[in-house]
Image (spheres, rainbow, N blue to C red):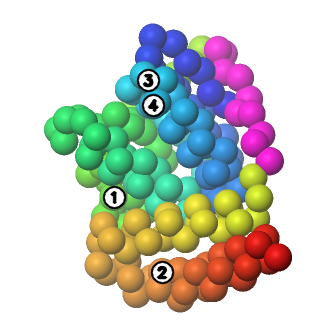
Amino acid sequence: MVAVADHAACVKINGRADFTSSVELKKLITELWQRGYNRFTFELCDCVTMDSTFLGMLAGIALKFIDAGNPQATPLELINPCPRIVDVLENLGVAHLFRITSGPKQGNGQFEPLAKCGETRTEIARTCLEAHQTLMEIKPENVLKFKDVAQFLAEDLKRLEVSENK
């Protein structure tokens, strides 16, 4: 779910934040950033877990935003993450890329469903691979956790791209 106002966007994540919504969310954030939105808030009070693809995608976006603007700014804010998600952020070495806060729920019912973009298997594989590569670049210890996943994703992506070009 997403709500936008005054060059700020608030995304409410319900349930699992995983690879199935990563492509759509990445496209939305990129489009809004290009249209001048410069603050992104993620309401996580109802988010029970975040997989490595989703987290790596968010970290990659945070890095791009930091590179594009003020390195002191953190345009991605995570509000009300559960302790489990905070632990994952810290263990994977990406917590510093976000402003992590807690407070009243955001959005007040102004949310609309995120539009489905009909992503292809190739787009999903590419997003998953990029997310895991980002996590490995940010923290070298993550290489041990994700090198096999990244290798599988790279091989899958190559296979999918060959199939598309036939």
List the residue tagged with mark 1.
Answer: 94
First-in-chain label (1 vs 4): 4
Residue at point 71%, 66% (across, down): 122
Crowd rating for badge 3 (residues with CA inside 10 Å; few <14, some 14–19, many 20+): some
**SS state under label 3:** loop
Crowd rating for badge 2 (residues with CA inside 10 Å; few <14, some 14–19, many 20+): some
Looking at the picture, which amino acid does disc 2 mark?
Phe
Looking at the picture, which amino acid does disc 3 mark?
Tyr
Q: Kindly give the residue lying farthest to the front in the view shown.
A: 166
**SS state under label 1:** loop
Q: What is the number of the mark on residue 37?
A: 3
**SS state under label 4:** helix
Q: Classify 121 as above or below 24.
A: below
First-in-chain label (2 vs 4): 4
Residue at point 78%, 70% (across, down): 164
Q: What is the number of the mark on residue 128?
A: none
Q: Classify 110 as above or below 132.
A: above
Q: Is residue 45 visible?
A: no
- Single out the mark in the foreground, 1 or 4: 4
First-in-chain label (3 vs 2): 3
Residue 82: give x, y in percent of width and height.
48, 47
Q: What is the number of the mark on residue 33?
A: 4
First-in-chain label (1 vs 2): 1
Residue at point 45%, 31% (across, down): 33
List the residue tagged with mark 2.
Answer: 146
Q: Magenta-highlighted stretch: main secondary structure?
A: loop
Q: Kindly give the residue lying farthest to the top in the view shown.
A: 6
Looking at the picture, which amino acid does disc 4 mark?
Trp
**SS state under label 2:** helix
